[in-house]
Image: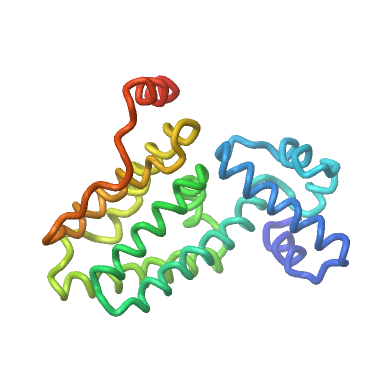
Amino acid sequence: MSTIDQHADLDRPLRADAARNRELILQTARKCFAERGLSVTLNDIAHEAGVGVGTVYRRFADKDSLIEALLATKFDAMNAAAARAAEEIDPRESLRLYLMGVFEFRARDRALADAIVRAGKSRPSIVQERDRLETQVSDIIGRARDAGVVRAGFDYRDLPMLTAMIGAVADATRAHDPDAWRRYAQVVIDGVLPPTAPDAMTGSPLDRETIERALHAQS
């Protein structure tokens, strides 16, 4: 079956039980990928969902097809977050809201960065959603730039690397302090949006033992 035929098949209305199974598979895959990354197999997902492997393969020909379906939901969520941030009247707060939002997405979802990298090779509807997100974020940054509140030269293309930085902290500290990433996200955001009156840092530094355990887990 061609890729086009697969996409057309997935767009056809499903019976109620098939629709429930598809949603269960998507929810399970979203959880597994978020917790363990894209190394999770379709067999792993079937086991976690409590369905047969054949049920998964009937809805998704391969893991890439499943990832594409999840990509659509990820871009929906990020576009919705960008739209909410854009409603904020204050340009500084608008950009701060979006930055914290995308960092939180990544802190919860190990697979976010890998999935977004795949977007450029996905079907046109997903590429369109990615482009819409870039346009929304560029507009938010443009407002902050016009207001003179964002560091000169900051661009939406800086976001993937900044998000990866916060993601690395979140992955290393998740088992010891699930909110530790917020402290370092604040430092990054203050670097992008230099405050006139800096707030105290969020949270507390990790103790030496926790730092050693977190860093050891990454080695």
Q: Residue at x 33, y 26 (%)?
A: 207
Q: Is residue 8 left or right of residue 128?
A: right
Residue in the picture at 51% in, 47% down: 109
Q: Is residue 123 above or below residue 61?
A: below
Q: How many discs mark residues in the rendered view?
A: 0
Which residue is nearer to you in this view: 53 or 121?
Answer: 53
Which quarter of the rendering shows the N terminus?
bottom right
- Above or below, 20 relative to 93: above
**Along the line of sight, the residue nearer the viewer: 187 or 142:** 187
Q: Residue at x 50, y 47 (%)?
A: 108
Of the 4 image quadrants, the one containing the C terminus is: top left
The residue under the point 56% across, 44% down is: 34
Q: Quadrant of residue 152?
A: bottom left
Q: Position of residue 173 (x, y in %)?
A: 42, 33
Could you tell me residue 69's position as x and y percent? 64, 58
Q: Is residue 183 left or right of residue 39?
A: left
Is residue 61 or residue 142 the one in the foreground? 142
Q: Colour scheme used in the picture?
A: rainbow
Examine the image and state in which quarter residue 205 appears: top left
**Relative image position of residue 53 (x, y in whole percent):** 82, 41
